[in-house]
Amino acid sequence: MSNSPYNPYETAQAQFDKVASQLGLDEATRELLRQPMREYHFLIPVQMDDGSYKVFKGYRIQHNDARGPAKGGIRFHPQETEDTIRALSMWMTWKCSVVDIPLGGGKGGVICDPRTLSEREQEQVCRGYIRQLAKNMGPNLDVPAPDVMTNAKHMLWMLDEFETIHGGRYPGFITGKPVGMGGSLGRTEATGYGVIYVLREALKELEIDITKTTASFQGFGNVAQHAVRLYSQLGGKVIAISCWDNTDKKAYTFRRKNGMDIDELTGITDKFGTINKDKALELGYEVLSGDAWIEQDVDILVPAALENQITAENVNRISSQVKVIAEAANGPTTNDADKVINEKGIFVIPDFLANAGGVTCSYFEQVQCNTNYYWEKDEVLEKLDTKMTSAFKAVYELSKTQNLTMRDAAYVIAINRVAQAVKNRGWV
Ligand code: NAD
């Protein structure tokens, strides 16, 4: 997404190539894993409310399903690109693998702006998307979920279309459904909470007391809001948050140096994660430029918006006080910026480990759908914590024993498992 000169697919492939060489993967395995196995590109014609027709471009990309059905969200965004979806599908494979759940990697998207579409028009985009793919997705093939600017309501429309086409009930087809309609308690919180579970473990390893830390966030959508909530509950202090303002077509950073109040902030934030500037000013928040989030004197940075946000241009604006970067967004750091961050000695919790809580809970949702028995929220979050913590510990241990960065260690674990699966299946 975005008009950035950085291409996330090139980033994802370069990250893969580096570790594939370290692992000494053979040519065929490399070729198979460095690109998606299947791609669907299609058009979704929609009759708009005014009677006119509009044609939207849709994509579904399945990177690898050797370890289980492909799994990944569907984004609605006006600047979505094929290469972003390719990269995201690849990262999904590694994400499911690093937390060791039996799923592969996929991703989808529609080039559209739901902020400018009515409810009915959005429903038509959702149903049209599934009509194009009903035979290429399914509980045992490829399981979608919400992502940027899609939510439980969109998932239910998609499920309904799938079930109408196939003539049956298939709640395991899609995750992120509303609770009571096959959804799992805790799914909304899962990604943000997962980020903080691994951040908590990282701080323990670094012997940093979380109650003495401050943080700055980029983004205030689903992931960031829940991450901010749990981090605050654990005693951390958030002093800055940036988000996109679609009226002004630019981002702003909101700051309060003595700490931000999550309930107060969510009360003035719309469903797209935009904090109301005027109300924030009334409540005494400072309103700074959109990129000010990165240059705050804090201990922790949490990019939780989009890819390609920490780049060679702004990486040197990171304060020398920063000790940890928890990558809540997918692909927030470009490879050149990553090098500088490593040189600075900042501890990075890489994206596909940090934000794996969402897909882990999606997997729990499938398990609950398949058994038709739904767990209490505490049980879901406890299981999530266990999975995230053990994945973090495995990556941390490897990074220490092999002297690898956390990103490389996470890649080594994830790629090894997938390479083994394609070998065991006899694909290469
Ligand atoms: P969202 O749409 O709910 O929120 C996105 C937030 O980013 C909004 O607050 C928006 O204002 C802000 N934003 C957009 N552009 C910005 C900019 N240029 N500067 C500052 N802020 C900006 O999305 P989300 O679900 O919270 O996802 C955030 C990131 O986490 C994405 O990279 C997504 O792929 C990733 N992720 C999400 C999930 C999930 O379960 N939702 C799971 C894994 C990864």
Image (tube, rainbow, N blue to C red):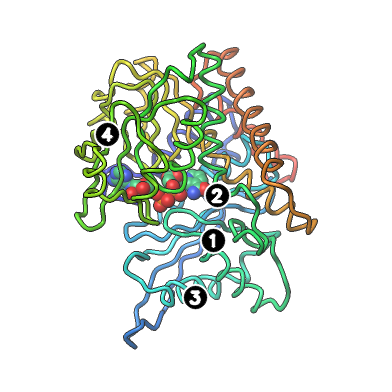
Residue annotated with mark 3: 128
Marks 4/3: CA–CA distance: 42 Å
Rendered view: 326 above or below 322: below
* Tag shown at residue 23: none
Number of marks present in the image shown:
4
Q: Earlier in the sequence, mark 1 or mark 3?
A: 3
Q: Earlier in the sequence, mark 4 or mark 1?
A: 1
Residue closest to the eye, 239 or 309? 239
Which tag is nearer the camera, tag 4 or tag 3?
A: 4
Q: Are marks 2 and 1 in contact (CB under 8 Å)?
A: yes
Q: Residue furthest front?
A: 283
Q: Earlier in the sequence, mark 2 or mark 1?
A: 1
User: Three-letter amino acid code at disc 4?
Assistant: Arg
Residue annotated with mark 1: 152
Marks 2/1: CA–CA distance: 9 Å
Marks 4/2: CA–CA distance: 25 Å
